[in-house]
Amino acid sequence: MLFRSKLIPTPNGTQAMIHKTQIGIVGAGPSGLLLSRLLALQGIDSIVVERQSRAYVEGRIRAGVLEQGTMDLLDEAQVGERMHTEGLLHVGVDLCFNGKRHAIDFVDLTGGKTVMVYGQTEVTKDLNNALDAAGAQIVYEAEAVTVDGFDSDQPFIRYRKDGEAHEIQCDYIAGCDGFHGVSRRSIPAERIQLFERVYPFAWLGILAETPPVSDELIYANSDRGFALFSMRSKTLSRLYIQCAPDEEIDEWSDERIWEELAHRLDEEGANKLTPAPLLEKSITPMRSFVAEPMRFGNMFLVGDAAHIVPPTGAKGLNLAAADVRYLSRALVDHYKKADDGRLDRYSDTCLRRIWKAQRFSWWLTTLMHRFPEASPFERRTQLAELDFVTSTETGARSLAENYVGLPFDD
């Protein structure tokens, strides 16, 4: 281990604890933890800094659909055992419109590929447990986190913990701290280009201890708006309703939510819907966002720090895992082969995949939701597109190949 610490004076007369490592990672979400784990298995040292508590990070309810490539990466990180035991393997999805359900068979259309429903909270716990067992350096509840010096040969991360100042000196910084994190906000505006689309609706999501209405996820396009019928286990359902972005959560009683879910589903599914007390309820705005480039000197943006997708296509966690895959391999090449080719291509390689996922997520969002300004003509063309996707091999294959995850570029 390269990790070492010493107390030294700073220019302002105070003292700071200095830590040295190879990779400083900002953010202990799944991307930061996965990167640290993959690097550790290759003998590359890292320190992870997180402003929230471990309990908060592990308790966040987020994405739960894993592409085959993400499953393979978790296996590579040696944290896939519980995922394979408790996760729910899915061989397709159902599209519901005009009161009827239509199956999209992933296995048949993609040559055997599937997806796994396994919650992000569980992925985070598995990574934390593996890192704990290996003695990894993770600092939770770090205050006043900043990144700097990334244009130099010795970038650094500063933070305060329990009233004491700390500085991590490293070779590279990985900004895995999400959309609102400090990493991207530390980049001068003239060096970064931002692309964004905000959608005129949101998702009201609930978690309820009730069996799923179907073995597969159901994407429903109804005259009342979109709904998604998903699950976390065979007894735990994760359900979503399209709503206005400015609606108050208190306006949605439990009774109203269950009635609306039934209205947006086909008759068979509605009859299987079993109302139960809600374990969690929240409203999530919908946006598409990309920051270019994703490398600034010796700092790399990873995951939500660089891109956000609407959750319709289930790409958020999977894109973050893809970034980690590319970056971890690039860093292994740097330290073990003195080859920086992948590091130099990191931004371009990631963005190529990201924009394809953005296109798919935008397309599926547009296909399944009711837009407030849509004309009757646009509604008819939307239904025609759904008919094309569900009645032709070309349409169904395109959806299936994108949903299970496109091939990696390396």
Image (cartoon, rainbow, N blue to C red):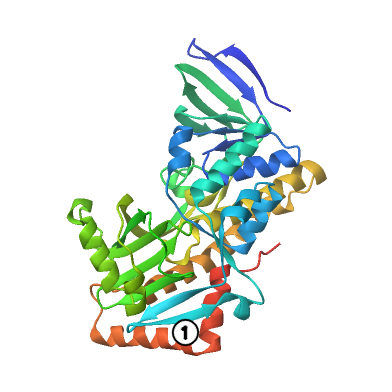
- Whether residue 405 is visible to the viewer of this picture, yes or no, is no
Number of numbered tags placed on the structure image: 1
Between 350 and 102, the one lying in front of the other is 102
Residue extending furthest right? 337
- The quarter of the rendered structure image containing the N terminus is top right
What residue is shown at x 46% (from left), y 18% (from top)?
A: 162
Where's residue 299, x and y in %? 58, 42
SS of the residue at dot 1? helix
What amino acid is found at the position of numbered circle 1 in the picture? Val
Where's residue 120, x and y in %? 50, 50
Q: In this view, does 135 lie to the left or right of 318?
A: right
Q: Residues within 10 Å of mark 1 (few under 14, many from 20)?
A: some
Which quarter of the figure has residue 36?
A: top right
- Whether residue 57 is visible to the viewer of this picture, yes or no, is yes
What residue is shown at x 72% (from left), y 37% (from top)?
A: 44
Residue extending furthest left? 251
Q: In this view, does 121 lie to the left or right of 322?
A: left
Where's residue 306, x and y in %? 49, 52
Between 233 and 392, the one lying in front of the other is 233
Where's residue 327, x and y in %? 65, 49
What residue is shown at x 27% (from left), y 87% (from top)?
A: 377
Q: Name the residue under label 1.
A: 389
Between 290 and 230, the one lying in front of the other is 230
| Rendered view: 168 above or below 10 | below
Q: Is residue 351 left or right of residue 384?
A: right
What residue is shown at x 41% (from left), y 61% (from top)?
A: 211
Between 376 and 224, the one lying in front of the other is 224
- The quarter of the rendered structure image containing the C terminus is bottom right
